[in-house]
Image (cartoon, rainbow, N blue to C red):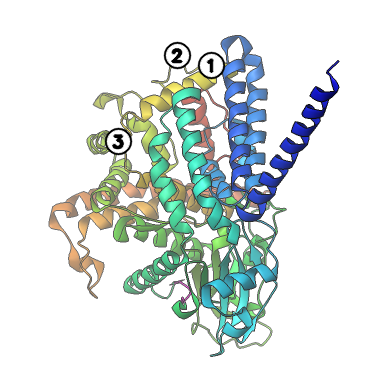
Amino acid sequence: MLPPLSRSRLVKRTVYTTFGLGAAYLADTELNASAVTRNLRTLGTCALISADYKLNFTPGHADRIPAIHQRVADRMYNLFTSNGGLYIKIGQAIGANAALMPAPFQQKFARLFDDAPQIPYPTIARVFQREFNKSPQELFAYFDEQAVASASVAQVHKARTWDGDWVAVKVQKPDVGRQTSYDLMAFRAVMWAFEKWVFDLPVYFAVDFISSHLRAELDFISEASNAQRTAALVASEPRLAGKVHIPKVYPEYSTKRVLTAEWIDGVRLSDREALGRVVGEKLPETGGGMFADTVHDEKKNGIPESMHHVKLRGGMHAIMHTMVELFSAQMFDWGFVHCDPHPGNIIIRARPGSSSSSKSSSKPVLRDPQLVLLDHGLYVTIRPTVKRQYASLWRALLTSNWDTIRNVTESWGVGEAGLFASAVLMRPVKIDRAKGSSSPAESANGDPGKELNAYEQSVRMKERLKRFLVDTDKMPKELIFLGRNMRIVQGNNQSLGSPVNRIKITAYWASRSLVTTHERSTRAWWAHLDARELWRDILFRTAMFSLDIVFWVSKIRQRVRALLGLTNGGFEDELERSVRGFARSTFGVEVGPGAFEG
């Protein structure tokens, strides 16, 4: 036994240690927004993940690998949801690229919604005092103390200005600013450890680029500037003006942590039932894409009173056609791309001033639809050289110009042109063997027909990805966010039953951007033709005819199956099945049916 003096010292030390740890925890919670606690949670979780893979990911334990993937997916999901804030954004970025990750990751990250409990009104009032030296009631004629929406970074309140305008006031949660530097520091450390020690994969190269854009997303002055710039670009494009609306920003009511913009009444793209009613169409019973989780109701606000007796012209086709054209213009013409076009950030309303009188008061009034784009915090600017290369790549993919495909991918440090082309188009692409490259499926490690165990699947995927990212210094970092945009738009189209040929519309904008100059002018696009590219554009349009045939055959098949009461999959669903087969043959990986949900 310990002598009495030693026991007394031990008790004192235990009490002092407990008190010290408690005081440190309290100080971190109250003064530091739990930043240290969150980082310790992050480092602890990543240490467990690393140890799990190092100890159990071996050829002799192949039967245990599915269980490892499940444990790791659970730990990562719990970490992101427990920490909230930027961790949700980082988790969503991982989820947007989860198609070739093990099934547990696909399933977990598909449910990672950016929702959070709203902070109490007194906290919001303190933010206004710091930013404006006024309370919300002093700044606005009316301010709803109850938030209409709350996410991990900010929440939105409805208000009315003294001029009588209804506005949406987005208020950043105070803890987020204090947590950001710590969160990004932890993100950097974890990516370095995963690249150098755990997975031996090039993942650290994108850390600076991603971190800078996540920081910019928290600057509401920058978000206001993005919205105003996009509104000007839309107004200058005759093919989009009137069809797309960017809510007006109120600079006098906006700061770095408070953003005030025009209030918009309409139907969110995420509310499939309400959207189907206002366009007069029956949507597929089970929508893929971004609507896979039908129990998630936070973004479903129904039909506003102003649209109760309105029917929108053109149906889902008009809505999706405008959406694909908008983001194609951003990628190939403007070089300024909104990177978070998920359904909660898109509202569909009747275009102001577009009403047609109805002969019967019982019949709905026909109106043109207008797409309203929200949340302009996350944008990426594409360098002119990369923009032209990306457009050239798209056109080359559709016309089987293998030399251009290889030239572009090699200049970007990409080692496998076929795999990259499949990621861009989101459909399987096989480079012509006669041109010196085998098909992706045939060039995979080992026999593509061989059934692989879980360990062999993971090793094959890792080796293929390492050959894919040959020189990360050359790779344009913009592609990270371009891919995110493309996948979300693809998911939106899939969810609405594939009403448009997304690939064709995108490819047309890519080709047209190569044959026109982009001086600011009121002249039509054909007035800026570049004769050097015109002949290639004619060949491209000829090649696109075959894609159109495939799309319409798919639409006919979809309608026939609907009449017979069978599963009503569309063009995007068929592409998804093809990509799943491609992943199976290329990587030996079984990709779940929900992996391509934007």
Q: Name the residue under label 1.
A: 456
| Amino acid at the residue labelled 2 | Gly
Q: Which residue is drawn at 48% across and 53% down?
A: 489
Question: Compared with residue 558, is residue 522 higher up or lower down, i.e. above or below?
Answer: below
Q: Residue 473 carries which label?
A: 3
The local secondary structure at tag 2 comes to loop
Q: Which residue is drawn at 65% across and 82% down?
A: 363
Q: Which mark is residue 446?
A: 2
CB-based contact (under 8 Å), mark 3 and mark 2: no
The residues colored magenta run 245-249
Q: Could you tell whether 220 is left or right of 205 in the image?
A: right
Question: Compared with residue 80, is residue 177 higher up or lower down, i.e. above or below?
Answer: below
* Residue 513 image offset from top left, x and y in percent: 26, 57
Crowding at mark 1 (Cα within 10 Å: few <14, some 14-19, many 20+): some
Q: Which residue is drawn at 48% across and 29% down?
A: 193
The local secondary structure at tag 3 comes to loop
